[in-house]
Image: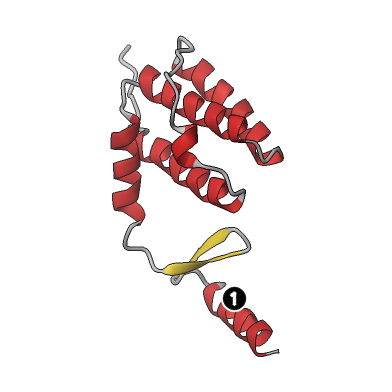
Amino acid sequence: MSEKVRDCRDDIGDVFVVLTIMAKQKNLSMVDALDFSGISVGSIKHGVVNLSGCLEYFVRHDEQGALMESLEALDSVCFESKNNLKECVQIAYNDIKDRKGLMHNGVFIKESDPAYESVIKSIEANYNA
C-alpha cells in the first residue's frame, strides 16, 4: 500500500512566521535563536511531538532558550520530512506577503474577515477617546 504524503512545507513556514511574531512580542532575538546546529529525532511523528512540547513551553515563558529549542525542533521536523527550513519559510512568506489586514492584540485580522470593520471602529474609538 502506498501512503500519500502531504506537502507540509507551508505549514512548517507558518509555524516559523508565528514564532517570529511571538519573538517580537516577547522582545526576543530570532537571529540569536537561529544559531543552532540542528537535532535529529528519528521520525516526523516524534519531531512533531517534540515541537509541540517546545512550543507550549515557549508560549508560557519569555526565554531566548525556549525560542531556540522551538526553532531547533521545527528544523528537525524539516529534516525528518526531507524539507529545508529556508524553503518552507519562503513558501509561507509568498503565501502571506500580499495579505492586507492588521495586528490586534497579537492576532492578525485580514481585511476580508467579518470582524475587521468592528476592530477598526474599536481602535478608532479608543484612539479618539
> 127 left or right of 76?
right
- Find residue 96 and report its horizontal and vertical position in percent: 36, 55
Residue for point 49% across, 33% down: 33
> 42 left or right of 66?
left
Q: How is the image coloured?
A: secondary structure
Q: Residues within 10 Å of mark 1 (few under 14, many from 20)?
A: some
Write down the residue under mark 1.
Answer: 119
- Rendering quarter of residue 76: top left
> 94 left or right of 28?
left
Residue for point 52% across, 24% down: 48
- Find residue 94 and report its horizontal and vertical position in percent: 29, 51
Q: Quadrant of the N terminus?
A: top left
**For residue 45, above or below residue 53:** above
**For residue 57, above or below residue 41:** below
- Find residue 113 and report its horizontal and vertical position in percent: 49, 69
Residue for point 57% across, 22% down: 49
What's the residue type where badge 1 is placed? Answer: Val
Q: Quadrant of the C terminus?
A: bottom right
**For residue 2, above or below residue 59:** above
- Find residue 16 and report its horizontal and vertical position in percent: 45, 40
Residue for point 57% across, 21% down: 50
Say what secondary structure mark 1 lies in. helix
